[in-house]
């Protein structure tokens, strides 16, 4: 696996937060997803920005995003040929200029009204990782998530509450260190970031977040595709186990179980 990434944009001291959102074929919900980020995150943090990476959508997602960006100066859209969620997330991170980065998905399954209380907890830590206590998802997805959680524990000795939760608030300093060892072809960079943080002894917290069913659209991963994807990502995790990682901070991984907002 190759760990060399395209150079990331330098930090902008006037930009405290970059929101990074990969998207693929979400024409029915992407406008609402962008509006939710604007209301709950961008309006709450002056100077913040949103980077949406359209991963080769085949519906009207790209056109909707371009229209929204023309109306919102804080929003930036990157279009790329379909390369997968992981590649889209890494592309967005390479463009982000903020001192902090918020990783979210575009399916609106995590209500962003939790953002403000989590943003206030960032002082003194390198990252805040969301965990979903109550997931109303198909059994297959729950089994895949449970298997991933077990893999991380067995391979790295790290008991992460919800390693693949699509809500992570990470400091720029953590990302700049992690990007040096996370492969460019990584399928699950969000998980690798959490694993890196624990292996490097970074100061992290796990925070409870609400979860809801999709309001529109359908997941692009079918059962067989999901199983194949899980097998490939598992192989990448095994390879990552042999990657030397220098400690970036004194070990201080704490778990803070915050009271999740009521599900709408």
Image (tube, helix red, strand yellow):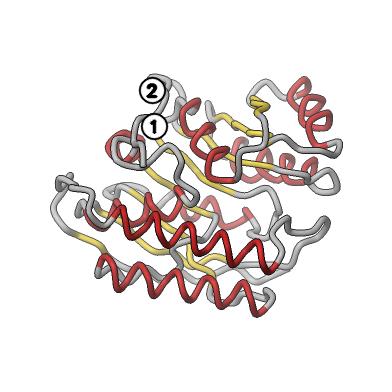
Residue 241: percent from the left, percent from the top?
A: 26, 57
Badge 1 is on which residue?
99
Mark identifier at residue 85: none
Mark identifier at residue 11: 2
Choose between 202 and 187: the one closer to the eye.
187
Q: Is residue 245 left or right of residue 68?
A: left
Q: Do the numbered discs 1 and 2 sit on residues whose CB atoms are within 8 Å?
A: yes
**Picture residue at 72% right of the left edge, 43% below the top:** 24
**Picture residue at 31% right of the left edge, 54% below the top:** 239
Q: Is residue 136 left or right of residue 127?
A: right
Q: Is residue 240 left or right of residue 130?
A: left
Choose between 237 and 157: the one closer to the eye.
237
The local secondary structure at tag 1 comes to: loop
Residue 17: percent from the left, percent from the top?
A: 48, 34
**Picture residue at 48% right of the left edge, 33% below the top:** 93
Q: Is residue 44 above or below residue 94?
A: below
């Amino acid at each position: 696996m190759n760990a060399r990434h395209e150079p990331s944009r330098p930090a902008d001291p006037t930009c405290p937060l970059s929101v990074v959102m990969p998207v693929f074929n979400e024409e029915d919900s992407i406008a609402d997803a962008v509006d939710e980020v604007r209301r709950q995150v961008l309006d709450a943090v002056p100077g913040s920005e949103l980077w949406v990476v359209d991963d080769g959508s085949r519906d009207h997602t790209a056109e909707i995003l371009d229209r929204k960006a023309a109306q919102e100066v804080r929003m930036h859209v990157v279009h790329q040929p379909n390369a997968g969620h992981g590649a889209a997330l890494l592309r967005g991170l390479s463009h982000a200029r903020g001192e902090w980065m918020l990783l979210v998905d575009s399916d609106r399954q995590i209500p962003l009204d939790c953002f403000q209380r989590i943003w206030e907890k960032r002082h003194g830590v390198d990252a805040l990782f969301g965990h979903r206590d109550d997931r109303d998802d198909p059994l297959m997805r729950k089994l895949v998530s449970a298997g991933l959680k077990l893999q991380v524990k067995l391979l790295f000795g790290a008991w992460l509450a919800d390693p693949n939760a699509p809500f992570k608030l990470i400091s720029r300093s953590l990302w700049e260190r992690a990007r040096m060892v996370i492969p460019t072809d990584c399928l699950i960079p969000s998980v690798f970031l959490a694993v890196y943080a624990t292996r490097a002894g970074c100061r992290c917290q796990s925070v409870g977040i609400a979860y809801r069913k999709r309001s529109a659209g359908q997941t692009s991963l079918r059962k067989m595709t999901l199983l194949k994807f899980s097998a490939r990502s598992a192989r990448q995790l095994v390879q990552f186990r042999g990657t030397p990682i220098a400690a970036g901070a004194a070990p201080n991984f704490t778990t803070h179980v915050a009271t999740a907002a009521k599900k709408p």
